[in-house]
Image (cartoon, helix red, strand yellow):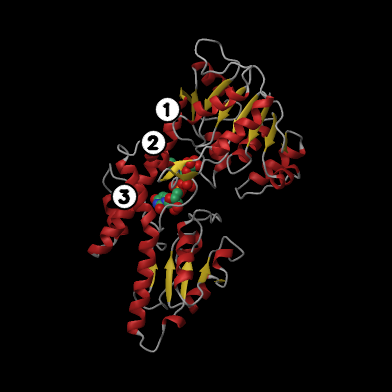
């Protein structure tokens, strides 16, 4: 069994490494020479616990190698990004260009009997679209969409569902949705996943599998939006939202998530739009949830500015240019170092633009000040509390529990995530 994993990013590389650790020959295909060289040295270019060891061992033992050039294989697993783009006056249209180029890259090396699996989170219909791109490039082969005839190539959508930070464990233990274009395609894909998945492989159609993945992340987005909306309501009504949620969650059928600075990461803030852009009339709740979550960073910025205003009123000798603001947490969620698509980073960037005094940054998971916050300084939590007039806590990193803010004036600690309670 020779398996080609196309796209060696946050999903492709761990998947390639886990399959290789089952002693299968895995060829990783990527467009970046730097990524290919790094992996072939046995190193990794992304941060994920335990991944380095597994890649290192797989490369050393000869089960995993990376390349820039497509090679024949029994199965192709496509794990490339699916961002959105603006088009025809619509802001959030799914962009399938990476799937298209992956399909066009592997088409020339496809052989009768091959299996092609799309793992990238995709709008409904993307797997069929991918199958068309493949068929256009290879008129000599029969694809599943060609009704009636037994197909030469099997095609399925099997969305990844792993949680960043727990990828290796979840890749193996999570159940998998296997969406074949035909039942035979599902059977072939399920057989491949049985190589390394210990969870159940549940078969369905490609379209249902696409929608299932979008539904999972939209469900979470809508639930986080509910918590975020409650935080705005409680702020208006002068009620502690954290106490409120704790009380409501004592009901046996209520389980409210946590409010925060907004929703970050590469999935939950993106995937719901794939539903909204296809069915805008029906997906009203899903769209509103996105808007509520996307609005939260601005709300936090207004809170900081109003605390700053109050501080200046109470301290007539001070001016805005000598008030020091400390931001606790830049990552997109607790206890990771990933700043991409982080609402906390966006808040810090906006504050940095608007406030005269450079920010004090507390982010125990990074070593360097991000380029967009040049001029700000990275300090310890204790140093920040010592120097700052206003503290804004945006992520409940474990290091932030139990910090003593008693040196900060009343009303000048804006704890968006109730870091003390976490
Ligand atoms: N967040 C809150 N309040 C909460 C929970 C999360 O504000 O109560 C925020 C986080 O701080 C973060 C964002 O939501 O900014 C997303 O974090 P997350 O931990 O909910 O999810 P991700 O983006 O790391 O991973 C999600 C997972 N999907 C679900 O849990 C339904 C993961 O299983 C998916 O594989 C992944 O998206 C993906 O790749 O699609």
Quadrant in which residue 222 is drawn: top left
Q: Which residue is mark 2?
A: 278
Q: Residue at x 30, y 54 (%)?
A: 229
**Residue at the front extreme, as displayed:** 88
Circle 2: is it few (<14), some (14-19), or many (20+) Cα within 10 Å?
A: some
The residue nearer to you, when weighing 279 against 218, is: 279
Mark 1 residue CB less than 8 A from any atom of ligand 1: no
SS for callout 2: helix
Q: Earlier in the sequence, mark 2 or mark 1?
A: 1
Above or below for 244 versus 69 = below
Where is the N terminus found, in terms of image quarters?
A: top right
Mark 2 residue CB less than 8 A from any atom of ligand 1: no
Quadrant in which residue 31 is drawn: top right
Above or below for 356 versus 45 = below
SS for callout 1: helix
Which label belongs to residue 226? 3
Circle 3: is it few (<14), some (14-19), or many (20+) Cα within 10 Å?
A: some
**Is residue 245 among the parts visible in the rendering?**
yes
Above or below for 163 versus 78 = below
Q: Which residue is mark 1?
A: 208
Residue 235 appears left or right of 79: left
Circle 1: is it few (<14), some (14-19), or many (20+) Cα within 10 Å?
A: some
Q: Are marks 2 and 3 in contact (CB under 8 Å)?
A: no
**Residue at the left extreme, as displayed:** 237
Give the spatial CA distance, label 2 vs label 1: 15 Å
SS for callout 3: helix
Q: Residue at x 67, y 34 (%)?
A: 21
Give the spatial CA distance, label 3 vs label 1: 26 Å
Q: Nearer the viewer, mark 3 or mark 1?
A: 1
């Amino acid at each position: 069994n020779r398996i080609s994993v196309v796209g060696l990013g946050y999903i492709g590389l761990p998947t390639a490494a886990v399959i290789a650790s089952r002693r299968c020959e895995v060829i990783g295909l990527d467009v970046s020479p730097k990524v290919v060289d790094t992996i072939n040295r046995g190193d990794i270019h992304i941060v994920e616990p335990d991944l380095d060891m597994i890649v290192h061992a797989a490369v050393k033992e000869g089960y995993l190698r990376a390349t820039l050039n497509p090679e024949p294989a029994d199965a192709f697993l496509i794990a490339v990004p699916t961002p959105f783009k603006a088009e025809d006056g619509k802001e959030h249209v799914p962009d399938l260009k990476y799937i298209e180029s992956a399909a066009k890259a592997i088409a020339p090396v496809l052989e009768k009997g091959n299996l092609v699996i799309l793992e990238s989170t995709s709008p409904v219909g993307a797997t069929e679209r991918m199958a068309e791109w493949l068929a256009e490039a290879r008129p000599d082969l029969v694809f599943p969409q060609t009704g009636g005839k037994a197909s030469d190539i099997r095609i399925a959508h099997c969305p990844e569902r792993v949680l960043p930070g727990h990828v290796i464990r979840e890749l193996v233990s999570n159940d998998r949705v296997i969406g074949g274009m035909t039942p035979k395609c599902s059977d072939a894909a399920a057989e491949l996943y049985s190589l390394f998945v210990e969870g159940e492989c549940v078969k369905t159609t490609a379209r249902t599998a696409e929608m299932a993945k979008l539904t999972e992340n939209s469900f979470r987005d809508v639930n986080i939006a509910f918590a975020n909306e409650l935080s705005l309501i409680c702020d208006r009504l002068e009620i502690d939202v954290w106490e409120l949620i704790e009380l409501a969650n004592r009901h046996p059928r209520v389980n409210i998530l946590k409010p925060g600075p907004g929703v970050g990461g590469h999935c939950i803030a993106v995937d719901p739009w794939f539903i909204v852009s296809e069915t805008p009339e029906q997906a009203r709740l899903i769209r509103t949830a996105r808007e509520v979550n996307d609005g939260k960073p601005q709300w936090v910025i207004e809170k900081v500015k109003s605390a700053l205003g109050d501080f200046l009123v109470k301290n007539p000798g001070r001016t805005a240019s000598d008030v020091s603001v400390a931001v606790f947490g830049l990552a997109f969620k607790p206890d990771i170092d990933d700043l991409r698509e982080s609402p906390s980073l966006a808040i810090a960037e906006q504050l940095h633009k608007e406030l005269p005094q450079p920010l004090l940054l507390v982010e125990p998971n990074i070593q360097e000040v991000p380029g967009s916050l040049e001029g700000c300084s990275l300090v310890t939590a204790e140093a920040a509390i010592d120097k700052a007039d206003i503290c804004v806590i945006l992520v409940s990193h474990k290091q932030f529990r139990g910090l003593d803010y008693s040196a900060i004036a009343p009303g000048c600690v804006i704890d968006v995530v109730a870091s003390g309670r976490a």
